[in-house]
């Protein structure tokens, strides 16, 4: 019988090896978490820019063409559409983006640059938020609640609320000048 020999190296990992691995994981986590959180603010900023640009485009299009443009968040939940219209708020067809030649339809919750930012229109009249804003050729800003349902002149506090988790921000539209402010 041969005597038992002691293995050259004990089986398993030493405490030092485990501490090194845990330290590396902690360093990676310390770097990755802030980077992931900064992506949320970039998504938020991208969504706000997209919505603000759509509102500005609607205002410019109404002034440029001398026609009415309906900013519509009512017909499709989570969408912000620009629609050619008349003084009654009727749907006369989509307003096309001059660059893409496609209908302007903003969906922040599905866009790869801004998901999962939710969007809620709040065009105020009498303290009540509505989902449609009719922009006239002379910058008239009228709140609508469907075709032919004019609720009156846009009031202060109007805009589009964007939300991401517990954060929210409002892209506002001035009730008098039509100035669009992106926070």
Image (cartoon, rainbow, N blue to C red):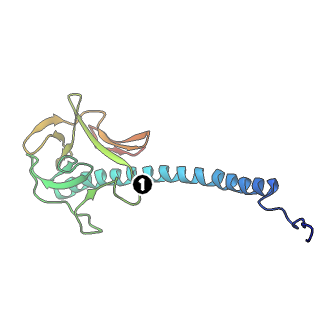
Provide residue 173's location: percent of width, then percent of height.
31, 42
Rendered-image quadrant of the C terminus? top left
Residue depicted at 80% across the width and 53% down the height: 15
Asked which secondary structure carries label 1, the reply is: helix
Give the class, few, some or many, for how many residues have Cα within 10 Å of label 1's Cα (few <14, many ≥20): some
Q: Is residue 179 left or right of residue 166?
A: left
Residue depicted at 20% across the width and 28% down the height: 126
Image quadrant in which you'd find residue 158: top left
Q: Is residue 32 left or right of residue 99?
A: right
Provide residue 127's location: percent of width, then percent of height.
24, 28
Q: Residue 128, can we see it?
A: yes
Task: Tell me: residue 178, above or below residue 105.
Answer: above
Residue depicted at 21% across the width and 46% down the height: 139
Tell which residue pokes out farthest to the bottom in this image: 2
Task: Tell me: residue 173, above or below residue 137.
Answer: above
> Is residue 35 or residue 45 the one in the foreground?
35
Task: Tell me: residue 153, above or below residue 101.
Answer: above
Rendered-image quadrant of the N terminus? bottom right
> Is residue 65 or residue 142 the one in the foreground?
142
Provide residue 146's location: percent of width, then percent of height.
11, 43
Mark 1 lies on residue: 46
Tell which residue pokes out farthest to the top in this image: 127
Q: Residue 67, can we see it?
A: no
Tell which residue pokes out farthest to the right in this image: 3
Provide residue 113's location: percent of width, then percent of height.
41, 59
> Is residue 134 or residue 29 the one in the foreground?
29
Q: Is residue 4 left or right of residue 20?
A: right
> Is residue 27 or residue 122 the one in the foreground?
27
Residue depicted at 68% across the width and 55% down the height: 25
């Amino acid at each position: 019988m041969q005597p038992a020999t002691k293995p050259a190296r004990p089986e398993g990992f030493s405490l030092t090896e485990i501490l090194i691995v845990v330290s590396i994981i902690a360093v990676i986590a310390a770097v990755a978490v802030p980077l992931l959180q900064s992506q949320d603010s970039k998504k938020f900023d991208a969504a706000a820019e997209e919505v603000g640009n759509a509102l500005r485009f609607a205002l410019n299009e109404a002034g440029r063409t001398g026609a009415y443009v309906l900013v519509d968040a009512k017909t499709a939940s989570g969408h912000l559409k620009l629609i050619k219209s008349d003084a009654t708020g009727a749907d006369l067809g989509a307003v096309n983006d001059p660059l893409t030649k496609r209908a302007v339809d903003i969906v922040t919750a599905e866009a790869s640059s801004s998901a999962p930012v939710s969007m809620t229109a709040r065009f105020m009249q009498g303290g009540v938020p509505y989902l449609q804003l009719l922009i006239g050729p002379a910058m008239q800003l009228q709140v609508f609640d469907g075709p032919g349902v004019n609720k009156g002149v846009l009031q202060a506090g109007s805009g589009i609320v964007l939300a991401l988790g517990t954060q929210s921000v409002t892209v506002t539209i001035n009730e008098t000048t039509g100035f669009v402010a992106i926070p």
